[in-house]
Every structure is written in C-alpha cells, then in structure tokens.
Amino acid sequence: MASPSGPPPDPAVGRCVIPRPRCGQKEDRRAAGGLPVRVKSRRSGLSAAYFDGNPEQVRRIRTWCEQATRLDEGQAAPVVMVVNELVTNAIAHSASGGRHGRVKVVVEVLPGDFVLVAVTDDGPSARQPITVPHVAGCDGDSSVRGRGLLLVSKLSEKWWWTGYSGGPLTVWALIDPQRDPDD
C-alpha cells in the first residue's frame, strides 16, 4: 500500500498543518462562481480541493468526489458516502463550520482501484470542546447521533486520523469500491 499523501508536514513541529487564510485574502482562495479551489498535483489519480465549510457545500463536494474517483456511480458510492460523513463531521465538530471555515478533501485512486480519501479540518472551534474522531457507541454511548464514523468503518478497509488534539485534524480512509460492505 502506498503511503498516505496529505498536507506537507511542518518540519518545525513534525505534524501536518493547513495554514489559515490571512485576513482579507478569503476572496483570493475562491474560484469564480463559488467553485472549489483546486490544489495542483503532479501525481496522476490524485485530486484535491479546498471547499467552504458550510453545509450547503456538501452536495458540491459529493459531486466533485464522484468525478475525482473516475469510477462508475455504483463503485464511487462508498467513496462518496465516506467523504460525505467526514466532511459533515469536520463542519459540525471543528472551526471548518465557522464563518471563514474550510475543508480540504483529497481523493487518490491507488493501484488495484483502492481509493484513499483524506478530509482535513481547520482545527477546533472556540465554541466547542476539543475532540478527536472516535466511533460512537464504543464507550457505552447509546445516542442516535454520532454514527457517521461507524459507517466510515463499515465502508472502509481502514480509517485513521492524523494531527493533534487542539489542531487541524486529517481523517483518512482506505476504501475498496469493489468490496461488499456486508462481508
């Protein structure tokens, strides 16, 4: 398996970071018509883009994600569902859901048609406690909400997160679009 490709590590601190937009530069980070800002990559099969962190963007992210996989709709479905859950979590549980929030989404089609996805948030929101991704129900929680990462774990071969508590987090998932999630 190829090593995950995410934001470049910050050599000073040894962790992945996404720089915050500077005041007054928010407009510069957006393409005309509200489209996502694409991140250039030299690797084929890799697509990355920044999106505004508002819930209305989730539909656009799903469409972009399906196109980025270059798979048919049925095979792209688990990838799109995983990205949908990860983006929704980033918006709900981090500063990405704030006024100037954003998320970075990376989709990479690997050899053997595995798909690696990564969603990076803007770090913790000032109005919410600092949390890290975990599957609900593992700690006796029986609430109806918080089942998104359970779905991610069912649809993925493996999922994990990088970053540090109190900073931007990237949640990764390795997906086999050919696999039956009930197996």
Image: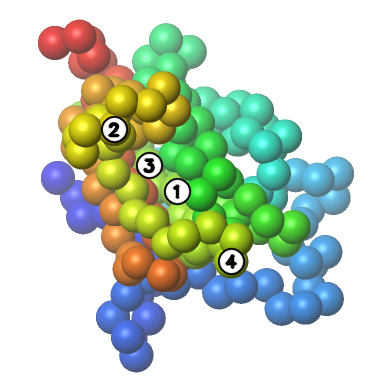
As drawn, the label of residue 126 is 4
Q: Which of pointers 1 and 3 indicates the residue nearer the eye?
A: 1
The answer to whether residue 63 is above or below residue 23 is above
Which of the pair 153/71 is nearer the observer? 153
- What whole-number distance in Å separates the C-alpha atoms at marks 3 and 2? 27 Å
- Amino acid carrying label 1: it is Val
- What whole-number distance in Å separates the C-alpha atoms at marks 2 and 4? 24 Å
Q: Mark 3 points at which residue?
A: 117
Q: Is the Cβ of the residue at disc 2 closer than 8 Å to that at disc 1?
A: no
- Amino acid carrying label 4: it is Ala
The mark that comes first in sequence, 4 or 3, is: 3
- What whole-number distance in Å separates the C-alpha atoms at marks 2 and 1? 25 Å
**Residue 76, position as x, y percentages in the image:** 42, 20
- Amino acid carrying label 3: it is Val
Q: Mark 1 points at which residue?
A: 119
Which of the pair 63/182 is nearer the observer? 182
Residue at x 31%, y 26% (from the top left corner): 142
Res 114 visible: no
Q: Name the residue under label 2.
A: 141
Q: Is mark 1 on a helix, strand or loop?
A: strand
